[in-house]
Image: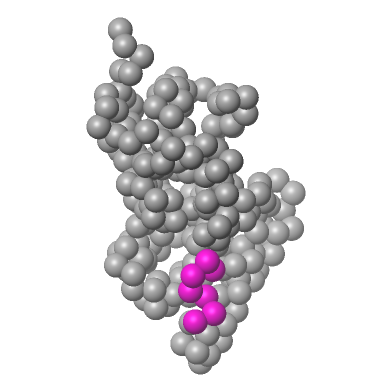
Amino acid sequence: MSNNKYYFNHIPMKYNIFLSTGSRHKNIFALNRKQLNRLVEAFKNGKTQISISGTYYYLGRTQKLFIFTFNSDRNLDETKELFEQHSMFSKDSLGHYVDPRKLSIFGKEITSEILSNAGFDITKIYTASIDSFVNPRKIYSLKELKSDKFDFSILIKMCRELNNNYSNSNYLSVFLLLKAICDHIPQIYNMHSFSQVSDYYQNSRSNKISLRNLLSLAEIDSNALISSYDKFIGNDLISMSQDLEALLEKIIVRNTSKDS
């Protein structure tokens, strides 16, 4: 049998990858066809790491996977240099990465096509549209929550409207919905303010996450909201998306545990 079992003949020679655990993000750049086959096979078989050209990449806890074409003969270092020249890199606790929207500038997103051709069980990994501010799987998980303490329907509706406005580049609406979500979430924790929620996770030893990007929005006085809009568009929206997804994951876990 041919090693090219995923039928990539019509796809350009190189591929760029974005991986995310929700709060941490990384890329694998300039993969050739054989390396992409190995990566997909590793996911399919549930492997937690893979070695590509002598570098080990950790695959465990991956919640998002995006695969992009990259019609270029650049090698790994040349690809990184290209992204640096165009100021494409963002930063998180693991280091620097290029987010999916920026990767889409250099190639077509083909994740679903590749995984389907590979016979991949799509439920094994959380894939999402580049146009999603909140991973649709997170919204689905919220919908599945059964709680006598809190009705999640309003939060679910706001997240759906958030994605709809984000996909249509209605960034002012995204900004206002994020503020509304920040005002709404403290009720889930029986708290009075988003700063209390942020402090709860910032001071936790086992559940620590940073919500500083959302907190900066939550603390804006309603009377100054519109005048503060320009400050929060661009890269800050990406940071807020990361904060919100991390917080939603905590809400899901908190309300599916036996003690919830």
Which residue is the extreme one toward the front?
73
Magenta stretch, main secondary structure, is helix
Whether residue 194 appears in this view of the structure is yes
Give the x, y percent position of residue 231. Answer: 54, 79
Image quadrant holding the N terminus, namely: top left
Residue 153 appears left or right of 215? left
Give the x, y percent position of residue 22. Answer: 52, 48
Which residue is the extreme one toward the top?
1
Would you place residue 219 above or below residue 17 in this image?
below
Q: In the rendered structure, which segment of residues is drawn in magenta?
A: 230-236
At x 52%, y 66%, the residue is: 235
Would you place residue 189 above or below residue 136 in this image?
below
At x 52%, y 75%, the residue is: 232
Give the x, y percent position of residue 192. Answer: 59, 74
Nearer to us in this view, 220 or 168: 168
- Specify the quadrant of the image occupied by residue 10: top left
Give the x, y percent position of residue 155. Answer: 40, 63
At x 61%, y 62%, the residue is: 211
Nearer to us in this view, 259 or 170: 170
Nearer to us in this view, 146 or 18: 18
Nearer to us in this view, 124 or 233: 233
Whether residue 257 appears in this view of the structure is no
Whether residue 233 appears in magenta in the rendering, the answer is yes
Q: How was this image coloured?
A: one colour
Residue 173 appears left or right of 239? left
Number of on-image labels: 0
- Specify the quadrant of the image occupied by residue 125: top left
Whether residue 181 appears in magenta in the rendering, the answer is no
At x 45%, y 41%, the residue is: 16
Would you place residue 199 above or below residue 74 in this image?
below
